[in-house]
Amino acid sequence: MEPSIVIQLKGVEKTLGGQPVLRGVDLGIPKGDITTIIGPSGEGKSVLLKHMIGLMRPDRGQVLVDGQNITNIPDQALNEIRKKFAMLFQSAALFDSMNVFENVAFPLREKRLVSESDIHRYVPEMLERVGLKEMGHKFPAELSGGMKKRVGLARALVMGPEIILFDEPTTGLDPLMAHAIHDLILTMHKTFGFTAIMVSHEIPKIFPISDWVAMLKNGKVLAMERSAEFQRLSDPLVQEFISVPGSMAAS
Amino acid sequence: MNVIQNLGARVIAQIEEMGAMLLFLLRSFGWLFRPPFRLYQITKQMHFVGYKSTFVVILTALFTGMVLALQGYYSLRKFGSEGLLGSAVALSMIRELGPVLAALMVTARAGSAMTAEIGIMRITEQIDALETMAINSLQYLITPKMVASLICVPLLVALFDVVGIGGGYVVGVKLLGVSGGSYWSSIESAVEWKDVYGGMLKSLSFGLIISWVCCYKGYYTKMSSEGLGKATTESVVLASVLILVWDYFLTSVLL
């Protein structure tokens, strides 16, 4: 059965600083699955992710979320669409003037969806889920890279989003911590059932946790397949890219 | 041909930036009238821009008033008009030095910090994070700073004027022997409502310039620590220059 598509990109083009980054990206993100976007550095993977949530708008082409075109909609309508989303940034993007508890509680307090007493019950529970029990009083500057990512994940999960975007969630982490973050993403995905779109360089670690893998090359989607099939693709560019880290690991 | 092309490109870039700055200002104020109304953020920024600038403003005002009295006394004595010292100090303070110097101090202390704070939030993707949570970053970050500056700069200027006139009194009356009565009475007879009004109008516009320039430079910081340093320097220089240039034009209209 064909999966239903939650985010659809049609012929998306983007030029940044006079340099074409995306040259006509066509991509459909299946609902409820983990889709990982791989590709060489500087190919515009993060730029692509930012188009999905409207942080960047395409020069040409369309971005559709649940069938609604978000390409040129006004800010307030875009904010409505964004309520379906959460994003975990490469740098975790925690508010450094707030402690861990306040960071996770921030979206709840801003949207005033739940009472303060519920926040005090719900936020520690979420922190415990990501393995940061009793860490609510710490400030981002006191946390390690892995801990920051966990707080970022807790903050992303707290509003119960339908779609979570992960921008290189394991960059800058040691292999053990990277593994732990991948595990956490997988566990949370199973628990909450959101659609996950992940940009990552972690080959081959992403294959077992991803349902789908797409590769961006020369500003276009070179291939998108189910994870197992993607690894068997005969395209020389795909093979060249996914086999290099493996051979390094083997050596 | 290349020279003309480069010149043209620069002019277009400058005009584009001016347009972007104007849009930034209009959009930031537009968000003031839409819920949620961010009273907590505005109060927090007033504490930062206003309350935390009081010490440096008092210090600067005191010494400005004192040196004005010193200089004024020696000039006026040549004409035997020492009794007018109070009016000389008060008019210089209220019409010119109060608004300009207080605004320059606020630029140096609070304006640079605004650029740095917003710039760091841009570089570390905190602004993008706000947007992804469906929170408008202009409304959350910029509008409160602009409102706080518009309220606090005139108040700081009023404080500057009062302390400066007090400093002038200490030097003129207590140290140089001018009569206290003539110091105050010359102020009362010379200072008119339009002097105070003009000074306050200036301070209001300076408050706008400081927050506008400093927030804009921070919000559009280039994504590097070098870019942040450059943005902070540019914001302080541009805001200071604009304050002085705008002061000249406003004075020529108000006189």
Image (spheres, coloured by chain):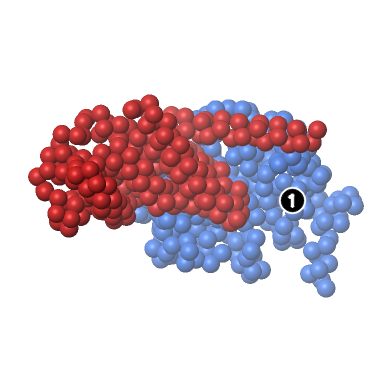
Chain colours: A blue, B red
Q: Is residue A180 visible?
A: yes
**Residue that mark 1 sits on:** A42
- Name the residue rendered at 63%, 38% in the picture: A56
In this rendering, position of residue A33 left or right of residue A132: right
Quadrant containing the N terminus of chain A in the rendered view: top right
In this rendering, position of residue B104 left or right of residue B11: left
Q: Amino acid at mark 1?
A: Gly
- Name the residue rendered at 38%, 26% in the picture: B253
In this rendering, position of residue A169 left or right of residue B180: right
Q: Nearer the viewer, residue B13 or B189?
A: B189
In this rendering, position of residue A187 left or right of residue A99: right
Vertical placement of A207 versus B217: above or below? below
Image spot of residue B64 (x, y percent): 30, 51
- Name the residue rendered at 55%, 54% in the picture: B229
Vertical placement of A76 versus A48: above or below? above
Image spot of residue B91 (x, y percent): 25, 39
Which of the 4 image quarters holds residue A207? Answer: bottom right
Image spot of residue A173 (x, y percent): 63, 65
Q: Nearer the viewer, residue B224 or A130?
A: B224
- Name the residue rendered at 35%, 54% in the picture: A120
Q: Nearer the viewer, residue B185 or B126?
A: B185
Q: Is residue A66 visible?
A: no
Image spot of residue B208 (x, y percent): 40, 37
Instruction: Rate crowding at label 1 as few (under 14), some (14 to 19) or many (20 or more) other CA atoms within 10 Å.
Output: few
Classify mark 1: helix, strand or loop: loop
Q: Chain of mark 1?
A: A
